[in-house]
Image: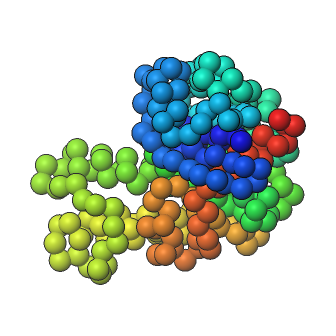
C-alpha cells in the first residue's frame, strides 16, 4: 500500500493506494510545527502505518519534509520518496529555474498529461490558484500563480470592517440583495471570470485548444460557472504522486 501525501500550506491531503486504486483518502489541517512523532500518532489513527510499502510526498512546507522522513523511518518503517529537484518524473520542465516549481504543480502536470491528454492546463484552487501548462509534446512549459480564493477573501475581511465572513457557496443570483449574497457572487463569478480570462490567454500563447482540468478544495464551487473548465479531478495531485512513485521504480 502506498501513501501519497500532498502537503499544502493550509491543508494536507492523503491518499492510500492499493496498486492503481485509490482505496481511501483524508484531508487534515497542515500544521508546520508538527513533529514526525505527532504525524505518526495522527495518521496511525487513520490507517495502518505498518501496512505501508512506501510514502510519496509533495510538500509546500519545507520544514515538514524531515518530519515525514522520520514518520516513514520510525512509524511506517517504509521507504519514502519526496518529490523535488532530481526526481524522475518523465516530464521535461521548461522553466528558467526548475527548482522554483512547487512539487504539487509537477505532480498535477504529470497526472494531467497521463489521465487527460496533452496539451492541458491544470487549474488548482489552493492557497494560491495555480495554472500549470503541459504542452502537446508532454513538457511542463510554465504557468500562472494568482491569489487563492480563501486568502483573497481573508484579506478582504481583514481590511473592510463592515464585511463579515461568508460560507463559500453558490449565490441564488448574480446580483446580490444582501451583503452576504453580494460577497458570494463576487467570489464565485469573480474567480470563474479570472479562470476564463487567464485560460484564454494561455491558449492564445500556446496556439492550441488545451484541455482544462480543475482540482483543489473549491474546484467544485467554481467549475460550473466557468466557460473553460471541462472537468474536475479532485485527486489529480495524489494521482501524480502515485505515477511519480511508479516511474522511480519504487
Quarter the C terminus occupies: top right
Asked if one can make out residue 142 in the rendered structure from this viewpoint, the answer is no
Where's residue 245, x and y in %? Answer: 78, 40
Q: Would residue 78 appear left or right of 167 to someone viewing this image?
A: right
Which residue is at 65% across, 30% downward?
Answer: 50
Which residue is at 51% across, 40% downward?
Answer: 46
Where's residue 89, x and y in %? Answer: 81, 41
Q: Is residue 152 above or below residue 188?
A: above
Which residue is at 71% across, 27% downward?
Answer: 78
User: Across the whole image, how many numbered discs are drawn on residues?
Assistant: 0
Residue in front for this viewpoint, 187 or 220: 220
Residue in front for this viewpoint, 218 or 15: 15
Q: Would residue 203 appear left or right of 13 to someone viewing this image?
A: right
Q: Quadrant of residue 202?
A: bottom right
Asked if one can make out residue 180 in the rendered structure from this viewpoint, the answer is yes
Q: Would residue 110 appear left or right of 179 to someone viewing this image?
A: right
Which residue is at 48% across, 55% downward?
Answer: 217
Residue in front for this viewpoint, 55 or 87: 55
Q: Is residue 16 above or below residue 207?
A: above
Where's residue 161, x and y in %? Answer: 13, 49
Where's residue 164, x and y in %? Answer: 17, 55
Q: How is the image coloured?
A: rainbow
Quarter the N terminus occupies: top right
Amino acid at each position: 500500500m502506498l501513501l501519497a501525501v500532498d502537503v499544502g500550506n493550509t491543508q494536507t491531503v492523503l491518499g492510500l493506494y492499493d496498486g492503481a486504486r485509490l482505496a481511501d483518502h483524508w484531508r487534515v489541517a497542515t500544521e508546520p510545527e508538527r513533529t514526525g512523532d505527532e504525524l505518526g500518532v495522527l495518521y496511525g489513527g487513520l490507517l495502518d502505518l505498518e501496512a505501508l510499502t512506501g510514502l510519496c510526498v509533495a510538500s509546500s512546507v519545507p520544514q515538514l519534509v524531515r518530519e515525514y522522513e522520520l514518520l516513514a523511518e520510525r512509524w511506517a518503517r517504509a521507504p519514502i520518496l519526496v518529490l523535488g529537484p532530481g526526481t524522475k518524473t518523465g516530464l521535461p520542465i521548461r522553466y528558467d529555474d526548475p527548482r522554483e516549481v512547487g512539487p504539487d504543480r509537477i505532480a498535477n502536470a504529470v497526472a494531467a498529461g497521463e489521465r487527460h491528454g496533452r496539451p492541458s492546463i491544470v487549474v488548482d484552487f489552493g492557497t494560491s490558484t495555480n495554472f500549470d501548462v503541459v504542452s502537446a509534446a508532454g513538457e511542463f512549459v510554465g504557468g500562472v500563480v494568482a491569489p487563492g480564493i480563501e486568502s483573497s477573501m481573508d484579506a478582504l475581511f481583514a481590511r473592510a470592517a463592515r464585511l463579515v465572513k461568508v460560507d463559500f457557496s453558490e449565490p441564488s443570483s448574480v446580483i446580490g440583495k444582501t451583503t452576504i449574497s453580494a460577497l458570494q457572487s463576487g467570489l464565485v463569478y469573480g474567480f470563474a471570470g479570472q479562470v476564463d480570462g487567464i485560460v484564454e490567454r494561455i491558449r492564445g500563447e500556446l496556439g492550441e485548444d488545451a484541455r482544462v482540468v480543475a482540482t483543489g478544495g473549491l474546484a467544485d464551487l467554481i467549475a460550473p460557472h466557468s466557460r473553460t473548465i471541462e472537468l474536475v479531478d479532485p485527486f489529480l495531485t495524489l494521482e501524480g504522486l502515485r505515477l511519480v512513485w511508479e516511474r522511480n521504480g519504487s
